[in-house]
Image (cartoon, coloured by chain):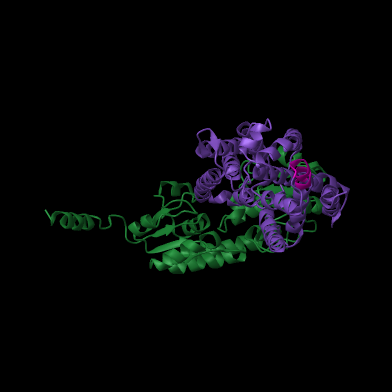
Chain colours: A purple, B green
Amino acid sequence: MKRHLWLIPLSLLMLIGISVLFLFYHASGSHIILQVRLPRLVLGIFSGIVLAVVGSSFQVILNNPLAEPYILGTSSGAALGSVLAMLSGVFWLMPLFGFAGALFSTLLVWFLARTGGFIHSTRLLLSGVIIGMFFSAIISLLIYLNQREIGSIIDILMGNLGRIFTHSEWRLFLILGGISSGLVVYLFFLGSRMNAVTAGDWVAHTMGADPVNLRKQVFVIGAILTGFAVAYAGVIGFIGLIIPHMIRLLGVNRQRQALPASAFGGAFLLVLCDFIAMHIAVIEIPVGVVTAFIGSPFFIYLLIKKR
Amino acid sequence: MKLLLPTLLIFLLLSCTMDNNQAKHGVVITSPEAAEMYVAIAGVKNILAVTDECNFPPELKQKPSIGKFGTVSFERIINLQPELVITTDLEQASLNEKLKKLGISTLVLYPQRISEISEAMITLGKETGFNKQAEQVATTFKAVLDSLEMEHPYRPRVYVEIYGVPLMSVSDSSLVGDIISFAGGDNIFASLPRPYSRIKPEAVIDAAPDIILICYPGQTVENIIARKGWDTIPACINGRIYTLNDFDVDLILRGGPRVIEGIRQLRKLFFLQ
């Protein structure tokens, strides 16, 4: 078996290992493990998979190593939607608002980046950055006007997996998680067509793929997945950027292999970061801060090593 | 024509001098607990303006507003030319800095223990020229407090949820913690690293409190019981969860003279008197 093919089972094993540690470390009993830690672990795994898979897909279809939900403004749109739902007092509608925000920002970016029926990837990234900044400015204004809610808004902006679920919220989460898993599997089946696009739009056409339609599909699915992830876990950067890169730097280029490896790798990294966020200090620290602290140096190391 | 613009500008500048029809002597109060202390000592007469959150006594609602607790309008304060601005610390620390820079006399009152409330009222009296009244109010406050002090052979374990998203509670070094303890409760988060701090939900389940106090609006007993894993907590099993419908949270959050009522109110909840 080629070296990189070991990546999928290896990342899955690492995920299982960190999950066991996450569940049992300093746990006082089975009640805590099943009712408190397990939901948090499931949310961490779900968000990690979504962020890494969407990041990987965006990078491939746009042929740009910087593309990921955060850079493309999708996360900011989802965050704005979630913040608005929270400030309006409709907590249970946060997933829906998050999804609507993500979809709205994605469509806006798409519209701005379109020239003559084609999407120019540099233009797309620029539009994403600008829309992201604009939405962030609205969030800043909302923070200023609602200083009492600052803690909850920080949770959305810096990521927090410690959400307290009621039984009905948990059932809704499982349903939405099921739908999202279906979408992740669908992205996996689009894998070979995504690979065709990396060779260029004309080549993809000759191979029977429709690049514009494919990008549309991946964009909308990416927006839905990011919307759900941000609504439940807040904005968590780096996972969508570094995990797909690491997988590629380790020699996996075909999407059908890169996607499962990214999924398990993303889930592993996010659960590890959440474990650290929970236990490193007396007070829990935002998980988005930990992902940046761990992700950046490791990514720099990989870049230097591959130079 | 060349002189028209400068002349207009000078005219405009001159016409912009402060409207000083309001009383020159008086106080502006930015914190609700300071307002309660001030009114107990000096009444409402000399108060020029307050923030929107200063809602007790109800007469304060008639006073002009200088904005919200977190976003005070400096222009309105300057315009009123107060003798003194009475503020609090922590969330208003940056406001105090700015007022100092503007050269406005400021008194910061931030009692963090019940015992500091009478001291704060005496200081307030000295700074505002109501020494006698302040000492009288402080002496009465202390006397009532002494009469309320008692030994509690049984102390119910209490969890105070000061905020829900994120989950936050109080330590015994906070005013709320001190009031809980004085009223006979045993705060499950007595030794948090900060007076007001984030906590983990599993720590609440592990601590198994007998009573849960919800201190923010929009939360219901049903929602607390429906939280995953919370069904084993004695407070949830025995229906000892109290929300804003069951008690006046201002009586335990504000370090003013009404803390006495807050202690009595908590005792009723803790010991079902």
Q: Which residue shows up at 88% across the image and 51% down it?
A: A29
The one of B1 and B212 positioned closer to us in this rendering = B1
Q: Taking A95 as reference, is B253 above or below it?
A: below
Horizontal and vertical percent position of residue B202: 78, 51
In screen coordinates, is A17 left or right of B1?
A: right
Q: Image quadrant of residue A227?
A: top right
Question: Which residue lies most toward the left here?
Answer: B1
Horizontal and vertical percent position of residue A36: 79, 47
The one of B167 and B207 positioned closer to us in this rendering = B167
In the image, residue B52 lies in the stretch drawn in magenta = no
Instruction: Read off the magenta span.
Output: A254-263
Tally the marks: 0
Tell me, yes or no, if residue A90 can be seen here. Answer: no
Magenta span: predominant SS is helix
Tell me, yes or no, if residue A117 can be seen here. Answer: yes
The one of A222 and A211 positioned closer to us in this rendering = A211
Horizontal and vertical percent position of residue B255: 57, 59
Q: Taking A84 as reference, is B55 above or below it?
A: below
In the image, residue A257 lies in the stretch drawn in magenta = yes
The one of A3 and B233 positioned closer to us in this rendering = A3
In screen coordinates, is B41 left or right of B210?
A: left
The C terminus of chain A is located in which quarter? bottom right
Horizontal and vertical percent position of residue A224: 65, 36
